[in-house]
Image: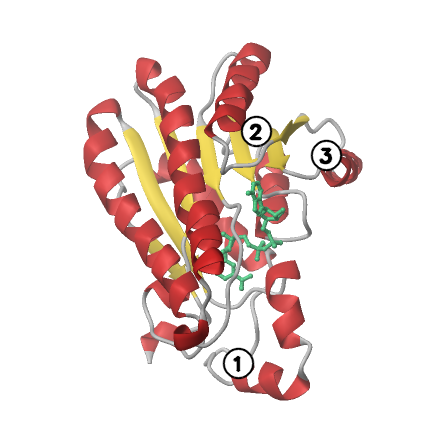
């Protein structure tokens, strides 16, 4: 077990998406996991499902809106009170914004930056303060292929993910003296609640799929190997990097 006795916090883990898959993989590797999101009912049923899937798994729920510094702070206090420490933070919660650049509304720009950038900053500030005294910790950000490659109709979301990858590099330097590793994962299109609505249009689905040389979309499980690696001691000499998992899209 690669994460035995580690305490992990995964944000945005109530849906059937990447966060949930990462939480499951961490529990399988022996970690005690806080799955966190805004919807308490969904969180509780997600926790139940994970416990059924992995008998003996230690799963806690953390009710939090990551755009509220107070709520994030209260969650961190609860994690430390309940588990004594925090070893791994996965900044997975995020929202999508699609649409032509020239038509994007200010309120939508504010919201996507608030969740995808400010929310990740709040969580990192608060949880890293708990890691600093023990001089050890792993922070994993969710970036995206669109932080690296340009695409039609996704510029503002892409800008938030570019900010996440930049933040990853800066924090890697600033937190290195505390032996806190900060890395990111940049997936291509993963079939989750986030992408499903757009992919339900058969023509659009085929068009998007054709971008991936490996000939399919990712499933959340395609992302978990990197997330386990970045949380484990195997990545102890790696920081400030973004691992791209995109079916070969950015290789072209
Ligand atoms: N699905 C993809 O194709 C894809 C590709 C690249 C990157 N990503 C990134 O991966 C991450 C996970 O996305 P997903 O595809 O699993 O989507 P998802 O919609 O299943 O998961 C996003 C989660 O974030 C939560 N969330 C949103 N706003 C929140 C807030 N303010 N406070 C707390 N929780 C909040 C949602 O409730 C949800 O559980 C996101 O950061 C996303 O940008 C997704």
Q: Earlier in the sequence, mark 2 or mark 3?
A: 2
Left or right of 124, for residue 192: right
Q: Residue at x 51, y 11 (%)?
A: 84
Q: Quadrant of the N terminus?
A: top right
Q: To which quarter of the image does residue 153 belong?
A: bottom left
* Mark 2 burial class by Cα count in 10 Å: few <14, some 14-19, many 20+: many
Disc 1 to disc 3, C-alpha distance: 33 Å
Query: Which residue does the numbered mark 1 point to in the structure image?
Result: 208
Q: Earlier in the sequence, mark 1 or mark 3?
A: 3
* Mark 3 burial class by Cα count in 10 Å: few <14, some 14-19, many 20+: some
Work out whether residue 117 or residue 20 is closer to the camera in this orientation and state it.
Answer: 117
Is residue 226 visible in this depiction of the protein?
A: no
Q: Is residue 12 above or below residue 30?
A: below
Q: Residue at x 33, y 23 (%)?
A: 136
**Mark nearer the viewer, 1 or 3:** 3
Residue at disc 2, secondary structure: loop
Contact, CB < 8 Å: mark 2 with mark 3? no
Q: Is residue 199 above or below residue 245?
A: below
Q: Quadrant of the C terminus?
A: bottom left
Disc 1 to disc 2, C-alpha distance: 35 Å
Asked if ligand 1 lies within 8 A of label 3, the reply is no
Work out whether residue 5 or residue 203 is closer to the camera in this orientation and state it.
Answer: 203
Residue 164 lies, in percent from the top left, at 35, 50
Query: Which residue does the numbered mark 2 point to in the structure image?
Result: 31
Residue 146 lies, in percent from the top left, at 39, 67
Query: Which residue does the numbered mark 3 point to in the structure image?
Result: 40
* Mark 1 burial class by Cα count in 10 Å: few <14, some 14-19, many 20+: some
Residue at disc 1, secondary structure: helix
Residue at disc 3, secondary structure: helix
């Amino acid at each position: 077990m690669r994460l035995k006795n580690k305490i992990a916090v995964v944000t945005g883990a109530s849906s059937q998406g990447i966060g949930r898959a990462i939480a499951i993989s961490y529990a399988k590797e022996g970690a005690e996991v806080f799955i966190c999101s805004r919807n308490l009912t969904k969180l509780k049923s997600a926790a139940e499902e994970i416990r059924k899937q992995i008998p003996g798994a230690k799963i806690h729920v953390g009710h939090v809106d990551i755009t509220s510094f107070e709520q994030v702070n209260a969650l961190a206090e609860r994690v430390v009170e309940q588990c004594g420490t925090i070893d791994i933070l996965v900044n997975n919660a995020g929202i999508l914004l699609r649409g032509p650049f020239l038509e994007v509304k200010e309120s939508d720009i504010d919201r996507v930056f608030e969740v995808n950038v400010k929310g990740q900053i709040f969580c990192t500030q608060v949880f890293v303060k708990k890691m600093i005294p023990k001089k050890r910790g792993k922070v994993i950000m969710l970036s995206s292929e669109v932080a690296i490659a340009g695409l039609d109709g996704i510029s503002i979301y892409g800008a938030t993910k570019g900010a996440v990858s930049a933040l990853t590099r800066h924090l890697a330097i600033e937190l290195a003296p505390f032996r806190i590793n900060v890395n990111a994962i940049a997936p291509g299109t993963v079939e989750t609640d986030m992408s499903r609505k757009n992919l339900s249009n058969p023509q659009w689905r085929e068009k998007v799929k054709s971008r991936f040389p490996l000939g399919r979309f990712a499933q959340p499980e395609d992302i978990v190997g990197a997330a386990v690696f970045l949380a484990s001691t195997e990545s102890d000499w790696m920081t400030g990097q973004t691992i791209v998992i995109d079916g070969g899209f950015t290789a072209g």
